[in-house]
């Protein structure tokens, strides 16, 4: 497994981020920025912390999902509902480059933490806002989690099979894409600041990045009057394509989405002349006879064990892959070398692997993921560094419940 150095030489080294978000999307944005060198201070409720700490699965009381998004961040426990806590956040915002938040639109303004207030003493500040439906529009005040985004944008309605109900994904699909998009928007705003000196507000709605990805369904309706429906593993645009069961019961995927790959697939199947058959000679013909061509492929895959079928497909340069489960992924030498990374500095997670950065730069080896912070683990450290608060002043804030300061786990 490739060792990942600390983020000292990352492209965002020197950028400081104050993360006010909880749950999924905003912490994903914070992780994306930290992955490339930014220092992230995570502000959490001083008692309960980020609700993601309650997510399952858990290992020895530690949420694995929380660990994935927050390893390497510093946690400060501050009560944002109290004026003293709000004042601390305003002071912190004056010292950072980016604030990332995911409250319902208008909430920060109610607390005196809107962009005008935060940028008053920091005009170059970038405020990145992630919400269910965005900061504008008739739905701006509606609450929204990923499930609402995945259903309202049209994704769930096209996901699944013709005889099954609309299907939402079993993971944070919309949240993750929104978080990555928020990080991209933040990077663009920081680049603009380098040229102009001015800060900016990045506005990300949970549903919009996902709606962009599935946007052909909108074009299909507005351009052709067609409503896209559920078609399982087909695309409706190219054939043959799908997931097929091998003789040993395992599954593999084939995407013969171009004419040359379709020809190579037929050759791999030992039937090179199929590409000359009028029913299969063009993509349009294959789509018109999709059920028949799919049966040809399924029968061939079903006659071989998966590994043998994949070896033949690789020999003929047919785009294909095993349908991996988690045990396949963590045993795969490619993923172990390039993608999977350990979380260090925590005995509970000693053997745990997770996906690392979503992209790679030639000039940067990548981050380390050291330590999963407890709620308020770094409160004393951060407030002492930033404001030179004395132990007595910190003890008073802790005693009044404005902040929490706990030992690391």
Image (cartoon, rainbow, N blue to C red):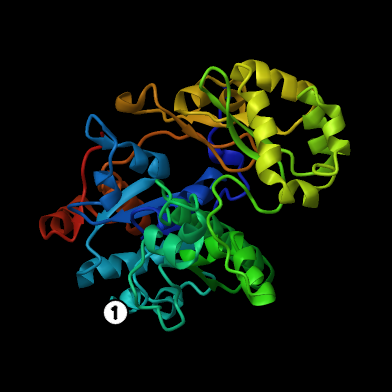
- x%, y% of residue 235? 64, 50
The residue that appears at 32% across and 48% down in the rendered structure is: 75
The residue that appears at 48% across and 62% down in the rendered structure is: 98
To which residue does mark 1 refer?
110
Above or below, 170 against 302 in this view is below
**Quarter of the image where the C terminus is located:** top left
- x%, y% of residue 274? 83, 33
The residue that appears at 79% across and 28% down in the rendered structure is: 317
- x%, y% of residue 15? 53, 54
Q: How many marks?
A: 1
Above or below, 188 against 390 in this view is below
Farthest residue, direction left = 399
Specify the quadrant of the image occupied by residue 257: top right
Q: Is residue 210 visible?
A: yes
Near-viewer residue (178 or 116): 178
Specify the quadrant of the image occupied by residue 223: bottom right
Farthest residue, direction bottom = 138
The residue that appears at 33% across and 70% down in the rendered structure is: 143
Near-viewer residue (357 or 114): 357
Q: Is residue 96 visible?
A: no
Residue 22 falls left or right of residue 122: left
Classed neighbour count for the residue bearing mark 1: other residues with Cα under 10 Å, few (<14), some (14–19), many (≥20): few
Residue 309 falls left or right of residue 270: left
Above or below, 352 against 69 in this view is above
Tell me the element at label 1.
helix
- x%, y% of residue 251? 55, 28
Near-viewer residue (108 or 40): 108
**Quarter of the image where the N terminus is located:** top right
Residue 282 falls left or right of residue 403: right
């Amino acid at each position: 497994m490739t060792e990942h150095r600390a983020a000292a030489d990352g492209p965002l080294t020197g950028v400081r981020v104050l993360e006010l978000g909880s749950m999924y999307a905003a912490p994903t944005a914070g992780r994306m920025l930290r992955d490339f060198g930014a220092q992230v201070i995570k502000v959490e409720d001083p008692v309960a912390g980020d609700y993601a700490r309650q997510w399952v699965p858990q290992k020895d009381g530690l949420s694995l999902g929380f660990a994935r998004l927050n390893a390497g961040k510093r946690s400060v426990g501050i009560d944002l509902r109290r004026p003293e806590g709000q004042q601390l956040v305003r002071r912190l915002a004056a010292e950072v480059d980016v604030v990332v938040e995911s409250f319902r639109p208008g909430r920060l303004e109610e607390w005196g933490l809107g962009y005008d207030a935060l940028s008053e003493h920091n005009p170059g500040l970038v405020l990145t806002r992630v919400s269910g439906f965005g900061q504008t529009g008739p739905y701006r005040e509606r609450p929204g989690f990923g499930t609402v985004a995945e259903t309202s944008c049209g994704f769930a309605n096209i996901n699944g099979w013709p005889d099954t109900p609309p299907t939402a994904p079993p993971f944070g699909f919309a949240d993750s894409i929104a978080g990555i998009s928020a990080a991209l928007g933040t990077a663009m705003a920081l680049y603009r600041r380098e040229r102009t000196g001015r800060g900016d507000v990045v506005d990300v709605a949970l549903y919009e990045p996902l709606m962009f990805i599935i946007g052909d369904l909108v074009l299909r309706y507005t351009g052709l009057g067609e409503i896209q429906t559920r078609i399982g593993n087909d695309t409706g645009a190219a054939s043959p394509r799908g997931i097929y069961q091998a003789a040993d019961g395992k599954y593999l995927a084939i995407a013969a989405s171009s004419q040359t790959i379709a020809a190579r697939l037929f050759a791999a199947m030992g039937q090179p002349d199929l590409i000359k058959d009028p029913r299969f000679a063009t993509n349009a013909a294959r789509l018109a006879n999709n059920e028949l061509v799919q049966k040809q492929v399924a029968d061939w895959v079903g006659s071989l064990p998966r590994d043998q079928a994949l070896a033949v497909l690789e020999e003929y340069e047919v785009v294909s892959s095993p349908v991996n489960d988690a045990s396949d992924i963590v045993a795969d030498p490619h993923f172990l070398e390039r993608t999977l990374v350990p979380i260090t500095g925590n005995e509970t997670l000693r053997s745990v692997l997770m996906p690392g950065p979503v992209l790679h730069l030639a000039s940067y080896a990548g981050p380390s993921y050291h330590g999963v912070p407890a709620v308020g683990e770094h409160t004393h450290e951060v407030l002492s560094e930033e404001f030179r608060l004395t132990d007595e002043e910190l003890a008073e804030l802790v005693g009044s419940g404005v902040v929490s300061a706990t030992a690391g786990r």
